[in-house]
Image (cartoon, coloured by chain):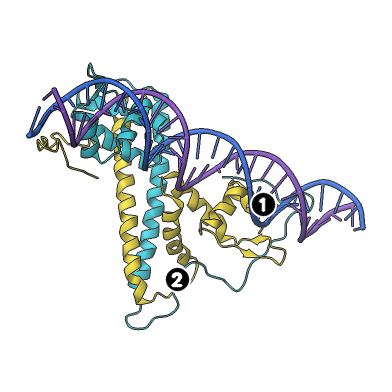
Chain colours: A cyan, B yellow, C blue, D purple
Amino acid sequence: MRIGELSCRTGVHERLLRYYEKQGLLWPERAASGYRSYQESDVDTVLRIRRLLSAGLNTETIGQVLPCIRVKAGNLVPVCPEIIDDLQHQRERITRAIEELQASRDLLDAVIAAAPLTVSSSAAPPHDDPPGRIEARRPASVRYKTSAN
Amino acid sequence: MRIGELSCRTGVHERLLRYYEKQGLLWPERAASGYRSYQESDVDTVLRIRRLLSAGLNTETIGQVLPCIRVKAGNLVPVCPEIIDDLQHQRERITRAIEELQASRDLLDAVIAAAPLTVSSSAAPPHDDPPGRIEARRPASVRYKTSAN
DNA sequence: CTTGACTCTGACATGGATGTCAGAGTTTAA
DNA sequence: TTAAACTCTGACATCCATGTCAGAGTCAAG
């Protein structure tokens, strides 16, 4: 299929399909005219790309992941352990975010469940201004020492 | 605490802490001098922000999620019925984000699981790939017209 | 006080993903 | 054959998260 159809079927702008190609994520064949010719499987590939992008992976990382997925349909392709390491790392990152969101959702559920049946009070919007604020004066010369992420 | 300490304790550049504030993710008090004054809990908040950002959520989405987390700190924030609707909406948004991330993680799991059996071989069941894709031949006159996503 | 560390605001810069347009060539329905 | 629909390349623009710098004001140790 050509780029327009792939774009329609995936909902991804043609501009991006060309961009993904330039980033090495897609390698459509070319007709004599220069027109790109995609395969059926590219529909899935594009959707995968979108999914991984939306999860925070960049095109470079995706470029390393895609070949591994592609072969799943057929034969196997060796994956260098270094990449696996990185993927494992990405996986943990995603897992943490999922947990974060689940916790948020649980709290949201609690709030919803505790909703007053009839009366209303002040809304929850941006900001709470707690009365007591714990102030901590810091080290003298170096005020505070570094610690990090 | 002031911005420098928060920056050190979270490993997040001061520039970003100010940016997050401008995006409505943080609302530090201000001293008479104009200096920002953060609470202890803001350390966690900033780390949460970082986790969600790294998962591909944008600051706007995070801004909708954060207030739900904040209530945990102490009392439940009273919610007027009018915004329950909105909360429900946010809940769905969060759920969708979770599902997206889970799908992404499954994708990575599939790749990791297919890795050469050198090191760890974590779970990640085979995971089925959509075998057949529904083919839609073009409607003739308008070559193809469907859209997706 | 003085001074160095800290903070403020605002402006400009960058990199990655994405949007948009222009001009030229290709395909295909009629 | 023609015209509309489609595609090509390349350039420029935008958005978002982030980096960096400058000039001015604040804080606190000595």
User: What is the three-letter code of the residue carrying label 2?
Assistant: Ala
**In this picture, is B131 found above or below A54?**
above
Pick the residue in front: B147 or A50: B147
For the point 58% across and 47% down, which residue is it? B12
The answer to whether residue D23 is left or right of residue C21 is: right
* Image quadrant in which the N terminus of chain B is located: bottom right
Label 1: chain?
Answer: B
**In this picture, is B5 found above or below B130?**
below
The answer to whether residue A4 is left or right of residue A82 is: left
| Residue B80 visible (yes or no) | yes
Residue B119, horizontal then vertical, whole percent: 37, 26
The answer to whether residue A32 is left or right of residue B140 is: right
- Identify the disc placed on residue A124: 2
User: What is the three-letter code of the residue carrying label 1?
Assistant: Gly
**In this picture, is B142 found above or below A79?**
below
On the same chain, marks 1 and 2? The answer is: no
For the point 29% across and 34% down, which residue is it? A14
Check disc 2 and report its element: helix, strand or loop: loop
Label 2: chain?
Answer: A
| Residue designated by label 1 | B4
Q: Quadrant of residue A8?
A: top left
Residue B100, horizontal then vertical, whole percent: 31, 46
- Identify the disc placed on residue A41: none
| Residue B123 visible (yes or no) | no
Check disc 1 and report its element: helix, strand or loop: helix
Residue A134, horizontal then vertical, whole percent: 64, 66
- In the rendered image, the residue lying farthest to the top is A32
The crowd level at tag 1 (other Cα within 10 Å; few <14, some 14-19, many 20+) is some
Pick the residue in front: A139 or A68: A68
**In this picture, is B111 found above or below B87?**
above
The crowd level at tag 2 (other Cα within 10 Å; few <14, some 14-19, many 20+) is some
Find the distance from the CA under tag 1 to the CA under tag 2: 29 Å
